[in-house]
Image: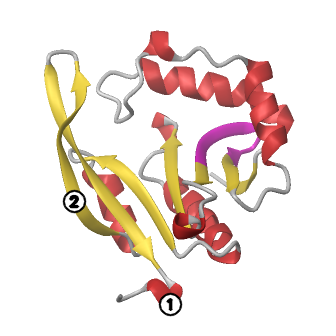
Amino acid sequence: MTVTVRPAKPGDAAALVAHLKALAAEPAINIPLAPDEVTLTTEQERELIEDLEGSTRSALFVAVDGKDIVGELSVKAISSRRAVAHVATLGMSVAAAHRRRGVGELLLREAIAWADANGFLRVELYVYARNAPAIALYEKLGFALEGKRAAFIRDGETFLDDLVMARITGPARGT
């Protein structure tokens, strides 16, 4: 497996929509999205990617194995308001066949480098409390647990907790 990470291109739109649909269809997947909630069209995804080109406030990265997209990571400023303009949030997914093979780490390292280069001092994320492999990866790359949102996710008749984690760098660290 030779996986590379790069910014998403408009031509990736169909593969990204297919990736999302496949994830949503997985039983016990750790994303709060049901298969019937995946309504994004290829054209809408293409427009979203085009809007990101050259942005210093949001980015979308893809992990590619050969010609196949096997993971994606979005990183977005939470607001343009000066008081929180230094904060970004991220979301990541990796195709089932490529999990626990370093793809998530490649994506996350790329996103961290991008966030650092664009002046984000805080990058935060939310992760299912049951997703131990993802939590271990986030901790390995400098994210710290900040809290738990109890019963935040509904999965059928079950309610699941998720965790809030953040990586803080630069002058904001330790304040």
Q: Secondary structure at mark 1?
A: helix
Give the image location of residue 147, x and y in percent: 21, 59
Q: Magenta region: which residues?
A: 64-73
Give the image location of residue 153, x and y in percent: 25, 31
Q: Please name whichever residue, 66 or 20, is drawn nearer the observer in this view of the structure.
A: 20
Residue 71: in magenta span? yes
Q: Please name whichever residue, 52 or 66, is drawn nearer the observer in this view of the structure.
A: 52
Number of marks present in the image shown: 2
Quadrant of the drawing holding the C terminus: bottom left
Residue highlighted by disc 2: 147
Task: Report the amino acid beneath label 1.
Answer: Pro
Give the image location of residue 91, x and y in percent: 50, 47
Label 1 Cα crowd, 10 Å radius (few <14 / some 14-19 / many 20+): few
Q: Is residue 112 above or below residue 98?
A: below
Q: Is residue 128 above or below residue 173?
A: above
Task: Report the amino acid beneath label 2.
Answer: Gly
Q: Which mark is residue 42?
A: none
In this picture, residue 93 sits left or right of residue 46: left
- Image point 85% across, 56% down: which residue? 54
- The answer for how far apart the CA atoms under marks 1 and 2 are is 22 Å
In this picture, residue 53 sits left or right of residue 79: right
Q: Please name whichever residue, 153 or 132, is drawn nearer the observer in this view of the structure.
A: 153
- Image point 14% across, 16% down: which residue? 157
Task: Please identify the quarter of the rendering in which residue 49 is found.
Answer: top right
Residue 152: in magenta span? no
Residue highlighted by disc 1: 171
Give the image location of residue 87, x and y in percent: 52, 65
- Image point 68% across, 47% down: which residue? 62
Q: Secondary structure at mark 2?
A: strand
Q: Is residue 72 above or below residue 132?
A: above
